[in-house]
Image (cartoon, rainbow, N blue to C red):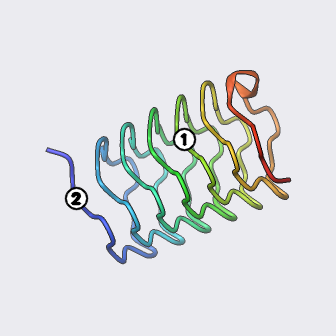
Amino acid sequence: MPENLAGQDLRTRSFASTDMSGANLAGSNLAQGDLFDVNLSGANLSGANLSGAELSDATATSANFSGANLSGARIKGAYLWSANLTGADLSGANLTDANLTGANLSGANLTGANLNRVNGLETANLSGVIG
């Protein structure tokens, strides 16, 4: 059964290599959290604060990050296939080697984001992207 952690203060917590698929983390504060290699497939992180979080090598297929704050997050090598990043703040985030195939980034803020070797941008929705 997926976890319901909506609105929780989870700053600096470690969820590294945890299966959180389908979890409800909407509006949660995960700033500076360690989510390295975590499975967030189908999880709801809408409006969550993930600023400065470690999400490298995470799997977040079809996850909902709409309106989330991912500024300064490390998202290197993450799989964000078909993820919803509508209106998300990815300013200063490091997405090197991430896979954004089919992701929706409409209205997202990518100012200063590192997009080196990002895969799947040609299939992502980039309408209204800032930066």
Secondary structure of the residue carrying numbered label 2: loop
65 relative to 21 in the view: left or right: right
Amino acid residing under circle 1: Asp
Instruction: Give coordinates of residue 12: x percent, y percent.
Output: 46, 74
Which one is nearer the viewer's eye here, 79 or 101? 101
Residue occupying the point 74% across, 36% down: 126
Instruction: Give coordinates of residue 68: x percent, y percent.
Output: 54, 60
Disc on res. 4? 2
Instruction: Give coordinates of residue 130: x percent, y percent.
Output: 81, 53
Report how far apart the C-alphas of labels 2 and 1 lie in the structure.
23 Å
Q: Please name which of the two marks, 2 or 1, marks the residue nearer to the observer.
A: 2
In the image, residue 13 sits, relative to residue 125, either above or below, namely: below
Instruction: Give coordinates of residue 51: x percent, y percent.
Output: 60, 68
Give the mark, 2 or 1, whose residue is nearer the N terminus: 2
Count residues near mark 2 (Cα–Cα under 10 Å), then give few for <14, some for 14-19, many for 20+.
some
Count residues near mark 1 (Cα–Cα under 10 Å), then give few for <14, some for 14-19, many for 20+.
many
Disc on res. 125? none
Quick one: which residue is furthest to the front in this view? 128
Disc on res. 57? 1
Amino acid residing under circle 2: Asn
**On the image, which quarter does residue 15 sit in?**
bottom left
Q: Which quadrant of the rendered structure holds the N terminus? A: top left
Residue occupying the point 37% across, 60% down: 26
Residue occupying the point 29% across, 42% down: 22
